[in-house]
């Protein structure tokens, strides 16, 4: 039998059964799943191991990177400060960041950039991979870059560049980094154990990541997908401590399943975090409205984006199309259902090739909704 630890409220035992079965089938090394309903933690499960040697149990203090599931959390941070701009999401990026106007990008709005319409999915020509570990330098390179399509005419998922664009814009108009705002305005007041920019003092809590043996499931390859994922310079040449410590608002958020569910609970509760308003009603409406829907030039799906978070058009985040959600490379997932005041998160350290819709996560979400 798998060694499963944590809490399951009465009536939600089938979720534990699904979680346990995934371990028994050999699909996990370590993982966590959490759900919060009407402000109450109904599920907070941990199982397996935090290390490849299987010597360190995964517990409620284990942290792992959640990759692109981070984007939904970063979008909350941006929404919390967007009111400082006169035109909110309709503000042109170049008004905040003048260098961004280069190469035909002067009219790109913040809303277009955050909903993956800017055409800056990656670098066609080689760059030094070390730039990915230097956010200001990488942002400067993006400011000079010519879009791969005319901004606003199509959308294609920006897996990594989104974080450098968002981070630079936030720093420019607030004077604080996105990770600092998250810590000072969300996590410390709300007692939430989540980090974009993980202090070195917490690195010993991070679980080992088992990379997938398969390539990301991208469908038919095109020039956009190559630039975003498949060049030798599309990601850092090294990771480790430097990558954990820097801020990458698209991809290197570190947390537990419970902390991720707590933050996605802001989507489930109209801009409230544990009973405290962190995003205005107007800001929340602007954050969560549809900005684009259609065939994605990068992901092999029809995708629907709000201002940095996905809307549930594919139904992989439960039955409610109004749910706000995101997935991360390798399988992580989080959602906030505003009609049920329900949030949930799945994290793990054994990655798959899924960019969205990992079967392990979907089975848990289906079991959760089956108990409601």
Image (cartoon, helix red, strand yellow):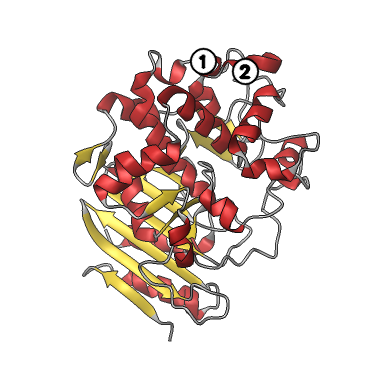
Place residue 46 in its image quadrant.
bottom left
Residue 304 visible in rendering: yes
The disc placed on residue 201 is: none
Place residue 312 in its image quadrant.
top left
Question: Residue 285 location, x and y as percent?
Answer: 33, 27
Which residue is pictured at 67% across the width and 19% down the height?
150
Which residue is pictured at 61% across the width and 29% down the height?
155
105, above or below 202, in the image: above
- Give the residue number, with chain letter if any, for mark 2: 99
212, above or below 197, in the image: below
Crowding at mark 1 (Cα within 10 Å: few <14, some 14-19, many 20+): many
- Give the residue number, with chain letter if any, for mark 1: 92
Question: Residue 8 location, x and y as percent?
Answer: 27, 69
Crowding at mark 2 (Cα within 10 Å: few <14, some 14-19, many 20+): some
Q: Residue farthest to the right? A: 125
Question: Residue 192 location, x and y as percent?
Answer: 31, 52
Q: Spatial distance from mark 2 to mark 1, Cα to Cα?
A: 12 Å
Which residue is pictured at 37% across the width and 66% down the height?
61
Q: Is residue 356 left or right of residue 271?
A: right
Q: Residue farthest to the bottom? A: 1
Between 238 and 294, the one nearer to me in the picture? 238
Which residue is pictured at 71% across the width and 57% down the height?
215
Q: Is residue 302 left or right of residue 256?
A: right
Between 361 and 30, the one nearer to me in the picture? 30
Q: Is residue 83 left or right of residue 123?
A: left
């Amino acid at each position: 039998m798998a060694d499963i630890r944590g809490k399951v409220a009465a009536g939600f035992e089938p979720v534990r059964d699904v979680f346990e079965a995934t371990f028994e089938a050999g699909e996990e090394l370590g993982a966590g799943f959490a759900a919060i309903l009407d402000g109450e933690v109904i599920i907070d499960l941990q199982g397996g191991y935090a290390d490849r040697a299987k010597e360190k149990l995964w517990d409620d203090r284990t942290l792992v990177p959640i990759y692109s599931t981070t984007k939904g959390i970063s979008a909350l941070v941006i929404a919390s400060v967007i009111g400082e701009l006169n035109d909110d999401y309709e503000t042109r990026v170049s008004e905040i960041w003048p260098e961004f106007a280069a190469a035909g990008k002067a009219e790109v709005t913040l809303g277009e950039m955050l909903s993956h319409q800017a055409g800056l999915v990656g670098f066609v020509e080689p760059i030094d991979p070390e730039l990915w570990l230097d956010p200001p330098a990488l942002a400067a390179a993006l400011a000079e870059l010519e879009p791969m399509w005319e901004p606003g005419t199509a959308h294609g998922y920006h897996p990594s560049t989104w974080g450098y664009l968002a981070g630079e814009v936030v720093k420019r108009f607030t004077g604080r980094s996105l990770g600092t705002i998250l810590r000072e305005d969300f996590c410390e007041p709300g007692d939430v154990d989540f980090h974009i920019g993980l202090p070195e003092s917490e690195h010993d809590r991070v679980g080992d990541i088992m990379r997938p043996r398969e390539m990301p499931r991208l469908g038919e390859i095109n020039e956009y997908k190559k630039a975003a994922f498949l060049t030798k310079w599309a990601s850092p040449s090294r990771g480790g401590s430097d990558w954990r410590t820097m801020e990458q608002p698209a991809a290197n958020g570190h947390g537990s399943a419970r902390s991720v569910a707590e933050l996605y609970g802001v989507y489930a509760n109209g801009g409230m975090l544990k009973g405290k308003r962190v995003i205005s009603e107007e800001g929340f409406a602007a954050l969560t409205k549809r900005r684009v829907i259609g065939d994605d030039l990068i992901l092999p799906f029809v995708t629907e984006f709000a201002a940095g978070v996905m809307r549930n058009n594919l139904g992989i985040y439960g039955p409610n199309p109004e749910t706000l959600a995101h997935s991360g490379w390798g399988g992580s997932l989080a959602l906030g259902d505003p009609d049920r005041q329900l949030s949930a998160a799945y994290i793990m350290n054994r990655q798959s090739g899924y960019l969205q819709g990992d079967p392990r996560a979907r089975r848990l979400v289906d079991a959760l909704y089956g108990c409601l």
